[in-house]
Image: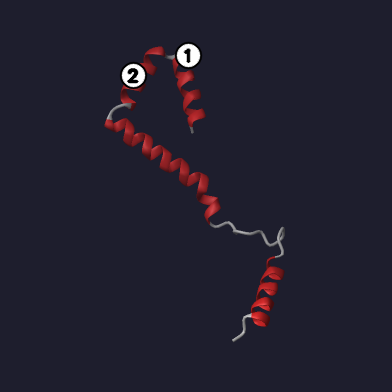
Amino acid sequence: MFSIAILVNEFIEKYDKNGSADFMKLMVTWKGKILTIVLLVICSIFIYKDKVNAEYINSKQYPVELSNFILQEVEDRYFKI
């Protein structure tokens, strides 16, 4: 996010020097702060939207069923009451 902010700021300064000053004045007001927070929340939602429903462990890369079987066997053999 910081890299994008720097690039946008440099672009604005290069092509519209007065617009950059106006933009900075806007961003230090309470409206600018709210706008920044809303943009960060929207970007965060887009970034993490796919990761919420993703599997924690990929069963194709890690033998999940084998691990569960081994844990169950150890529990049955050594921790039975």
Taking the view exactly as shown, the residue that stands out farthest to the left is: 30
Which residue does the image show at 41% across and 13% down from the upper left? 17
Q: Disc 1 vs disc 2: Cβ atoms closer than 8 Å?
A: no
Relative to residue 68, is residue 29 depicted above or below? Answer: above
Residue 50 in the figure: left or right of residue 38: right
Give me the C-alpha separation between circle 1 and circle 2. Answer: 14 Å
Total numbered labels placed on residues in the image: 2
Residue 9 in the figure: left or right of residue 35: right
Residues 23 and 76: in front is 76
Q: Position of residue 34 (x, y in %)?
A: 32, 36
Label 1 packing within 10 angstroms: few (<14), some (14-19), many (20+):
few
Q: Position of residue 30 (x, y in %)?
A: 27, 32
Q: Position of residue 24 (x, y in %)?
A: 35, 22
**Label 2 element class:** helix
Q: Amino acid at mark 1?
A: Lys
Taking the view exactly as shown, the residue that stands out farthest to the bottom is: 81
Residue 2 in the figure: left or right of residue 74: left
Label 2 packing within 10 angstroms: few (<14), some (14-19), many (20+):
few
Task: Name the quadrant containing residue 42.
Answer: top left
Q: Earlier in the sequence, mark 1 or mark 2?
A: 1
Q: Amino acid at mark 2?
A: Asp
- The circle drawn on residue 27 is none
**Label 1 element class:** helix
Residue linked to disc 1: 14
Residue 73 in the figure: left or right of residue 23: right
Q: Position of residue 16 (x, y in %)?
A: 42, 14
Which residue does the image show at 52% across and 44% down from the upper left? 47
Residues 70 and 31: in front is 70
Report the quarter where the C terminus lies.
Answer: bottom right
Residue linked to disc 2: 22
Task: Name the quadrant containing residue 61.
Answer: bottom right
